[in-house]
Image (tube, grey):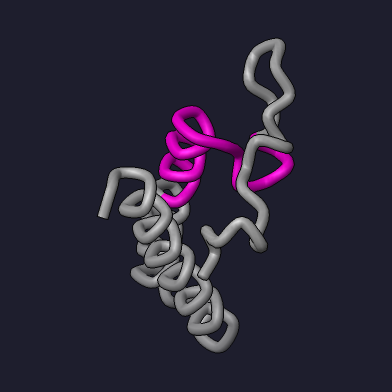
């Protein structure tokens, strides 16, 4: 697994944890420890996405800007065999 694949894998793992924590917090909104975990992983997620976008291509439209260059179209498309 190369560095790009590892970064995408890490983003997916942290994203899953955030969704799971969000679902838990929906039913346990006063759990301060869970909120701390959510905030912790949310910071990690945003840093991972930022790092990936700077090194490869943006994963979200909000990360498409890169100085003076528009990079949104730089990502491979699903039919190019990279998503499966």
| Residue pictured at 71% horizontal, 11% vertical | 68
Q: How many marks?
A: 0
Magenta stretch encompasses residue 53: yes
| Residue pictured at 38% horizontal, 66% vertical | 13
Instruction: List x then y, in percent, for residue 31.
Output: 43, 76
Residue 33 lies in what quarter of the image?
Answer: bottom left
By secondary structure, the bulk of the magenta-drawn segment is best described as: helix
Instruction: List x then y, in percent, for residue 2.
Output: 28, 48
55 or 48, which is in the foreground?
55
Residue 63 lies in what quarter of the image?
Answer: top right
Q: Is residue 79 above or below residue 2?
A: below
Q: Is residue 23 above or below residue 36?
A: below
Q: Which residues are magenta?
A: 45-63
| Residue pictured at 62% horizontal, 43% vertical | 75
Instruction: List x then y, in percent, for residue 11.
Output: 43, 56
Instruction: List x then y, in percent, for residue 64.
Output: 69, 33
Seen as rendered, the residue at the extreme left is 1
Q: Is residue 31 above or below residue 57?
A: below
Q: Is residue 27 above or below residue 78?
A: below
Seen as rendered, the residue at the extreme front is 80
Magenta stretch encompasses residue 62: yes
| Residue pictured at 70% horizontal, 17% vertical | 69
Describe residue 78's horizontal placement relative to residue 48 as left or right.
right
6 or 36, which is in the foreground?
6
Seen as rendered, the residue at the extreme top is 68
Quadrant for the N terminus in the image? bottom left
């Amino acid at each position: 697994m190369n560095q790009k694949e590892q970064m995408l894998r890490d983003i997916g793992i942290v994203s899953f944890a955030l969704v799971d924590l969000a679902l838990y917090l929906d039913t346990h909104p006063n759990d301060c420890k869970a909120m701390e975990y959510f905030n912790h992983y949310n910071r990690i997620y945003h840093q991972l996405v930022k790092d990936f976008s700077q090194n490869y291509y943006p994963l979200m439209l909000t990360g498409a800007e890169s100085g003076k260059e528009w990079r949104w179209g730089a990502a491979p498309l699903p039919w190019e065999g990279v998503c499966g």
